[in-house]
Amino acid sequence: MRIRDIDKEKLVITTAIDQIVRDGFQGFSMNKLAKACSISVGTLYIYYKDKDDLIQKIGAIIALKFFTGTVKDFSPKMSFEDGLWKQWENRAAFTMKYPKEVAFFEIVKHSPHSEIILESIKEFADFRKIMTEFIDNGHRNKQLVPMTFEAFWSVAYGPLYTLLNLHTEGKSMGGKPFTLTKEIMKEAFSRTIKALKP
C-alpha cells in the first residue's frame, strides 16, 4: 500500500477546486484531475473512493474552515447589532481571503453533496446552535423583528453577499470598477440593521 503524500494531497485539492469552479461538475473528472496534477488516476484512489467522495471531502474541509472563521470573536450573547456586524466582518474576511473556495462551495451548496457534507461535520451542529441562540436572544431582547428564517437570512446577509459578489468580480453594475471597502460595508449594514430592528 502506498503512503499518502501531504503535498500531493494539497495539490489535488487546489486543482480540483480550480477545475470545478471553472468547469462545474459536468466538466470535472478524476482523469482530468490526475492529468492536471501530473499523477496517475490510481494515486487519486489512495486519497478518495471516487469522484463524489473527493467532492464531499473537499466540501467538508471548506465548510469547516468557513464555520470556524464565521464564529471568530463572535458570541451569541452579543447585542444583535454587534453580533451581526461581527458576522459581516467574518464572512467578508473569509470570502475575500478564499474566493475560489467560496465559489466551489456555492456550486456544491446547490447539489446533492450539500446535505452529505453538512451531516459529516460535527461542528455544523455547533454552528447552527450558536446562530439559533443568537437569533433567539435578538428576539427575546426585542432587538430583532419577528420574521421567517428565510426572510431574516435574505435581509441580514443578502446585501453583504451582493457586495462580496461585486468585489469578487471586480466591477459594479455597468462594468464600473469596484472594490468593497469598510465604509461601503458599513453603509449597507446601517440600512440592513434598520430593516431588522423593531
Image (cartoon, rainbow, N blue to C red):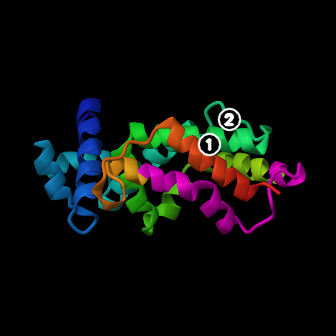
Left or right side of 82 for 31 = left
Residue 189 visible here:
yes
Pointer 1: residues within 10 angstroms few (<14), some, or many (20+)?
Answer: many
SS for callout 2: loop
Q: Nearer the viewer, residue 128 or 82?
A: 82
Residue 198's spot in the image, x, y percent?
Answer: 83, 57
SS for callout 1: helix
Residue 5's spot in the image, x, y percent?
Answer: 26, 32
Amino acid type at mark 1: Gln
Left or right side of 74 for 141 = right
Q: Are marks 1 and 2 in contact (CB under 8 Å)?
A: yes
Which residue does the image show at 10% across and 42% down from the upper left?
A: 38
Q: Nearer the viewer, residue 123 or 21?
A: 21
**Residue bearing mark 2:** 74
Residue 157's spot in the image, x, y percent?
Answer: 59, 55
Which residue does the image show at 36% across and 60% down from the upper left?
A: 173
Amino acid type at mark 2: Phe
Pointer 2: residues within 10 angstroms few (<14), some, or many (20+)?
Answer: some
Residue 5: say if magenta: no
Q: Which residues are magenta?
A: 137-164
Residue 69 lies in quadrant: top right
Residue 181's spot in the image, x, y percent?
Answer: 46, 38
**Residue bearing mark 1:** 87
In the rendered structure, which disc, 1 or 2, sits on the residue that comes first in sequence?
Answer: 2
Residue 139: say if magenta: yes
Distance (Cα) linking label 1 and label 2: 7 Å
Q: Nearer the viewer, residue 69 or 14?
A: 69
Residue 58 visible here:
no
